[in-house]
Amino acid sequence: MQSNKYCINGGRSMTIEKMDFNARSLLFAKLSSIAYNNVKEAKSQAKKLGFTTTEFYQKDGAQAYRFMNKTDLVIACRGTEPTEFNDISADLKALPVMAETISRVHQGFKAEVDELWPAVTEDINRKANLGKTLWFCGHSLGAAMATIMASRCLHDEELNDPVELYTFGSPRVGWRGYVKSLGVTHHRWKNNNDIVTTVPLWIMGYVHHGTEHYLNAYGNYRKPTGWQLVKDKWRGIWMGLKQGKIDSFGDHSMTEYIKHITQIKS
């Protein structure tokens, strides 16, 4: 396998920028899932996708991976681990604090990024990496971290500008002023009733960033509005109850995101 190509589902290989939107979304969904694995397993799985080097960042519970080859550098932030106190603590610290740019950002998410930022920027800033195409992705808490990191890169003249940001099951990250200042192209995937996408509450001033890509109760890529959206959400709840599941929690699974995105036809 050539180091600057990617294989998705055993199909043809191509560089990230030449992929269509669906294939690119699937790649970043898989990398966001791989970010939950231990280093040995992450390296093995990333190599199968065409990434020759893997770096693991970790400090005080905050974690992310850097996957890289000859042309691309991807930062994939790890989401919430239910058994990790630091992750739960970060999610619960929902008080808005001053952001680096403007307005306010989620305290817990910002703190996680602050822990890793020196190592991430040192890696991105290496002479050998400056010419690489930069991407960010993540799921859950990792989605929020990836959003903040991508924005910081975009506003730092010494760092490469990220091409795009792909997130899955992302919570709201900051207030409207902060979100407007982010600037990065953000594709935000939401699976039906995914509970994490509803927090922190909008009444606290938090709003979403990016273009939402909605997966309906059947796992299909749709853009329902108004009453259609309400019906689809209730449909998801009912389908979950018939299976003995709580839909809002099941919909947050990275496995579900990958399954549904895999089924989308280009």
Image (cartoon, rainbow, N blue to C red):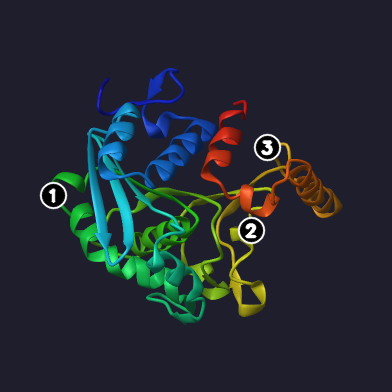
Query: Crowding near pointer 1: few (<14 within 10 Å), some, many (20+)?
Result: few
| Residue 159, picture quadrant | bottom left
| Residue 45, picture quadrant | top left
Kind of element beneath mark 2: helix
The tag on residue 195 is 2
Q: Is residue 19 above or below residue 65?
A: above
Q: Amino acid at mark 2?
A: Ile
Q: Residue at x 64, y 63 (%)?
A: 198
Kind of element beneath mark 1: helix
Of callouts 3 and 1, which one flags the residue occurring earlier in the amino acid sequence? 1
- Relative image position of residue 77 (x, y in whole percent): 38, 53
- Relative image position of residue 105 (x, y in whole percent): 47, 74
**Which quadrant holds the N terminus?**
top left
Q: How far apart are the alpha carbons under marks 3 and 1?
A: 43 Å
Is disc 3 in contact with disc 1, using a CB cutoff of under 8 Å?
A: no
Residue 210 lies left or right of residue 31; in this view the side is: right
The tag on residue 219 is 3
Is disc 3 in contact with disc 2, using a CB cutoff of under 8 Å?
A: no
- Relative image position of residue 62 (x, y in whole percent): 33, 62
| Residue 46, picture quadrant | top left
Toward the viewer: 203 or 159?
Answer: 203
Of callouts 2 and 1, which one flags the residue occurring earlier in the amino acid sequence? 1
| Residue farthest along the left direction in this orientation | 127
- Relative image position of residue 218 (x, y in whole percent): 73, 36
Q: Is residue 86 above or below residue 46?
A: below
Q: How far apart are the alpha carbons under marks 2 and 1?
A: 41 Å
* Front position among marks 2 and 1: 2
Residue 213 lies left or right of residue 141; in this view the side is: right
The residue that mark 1 highlights is: 127
Query: Crowding near pointer 3: few (<14 within 10 Å), some, many (20+)?
Result: some
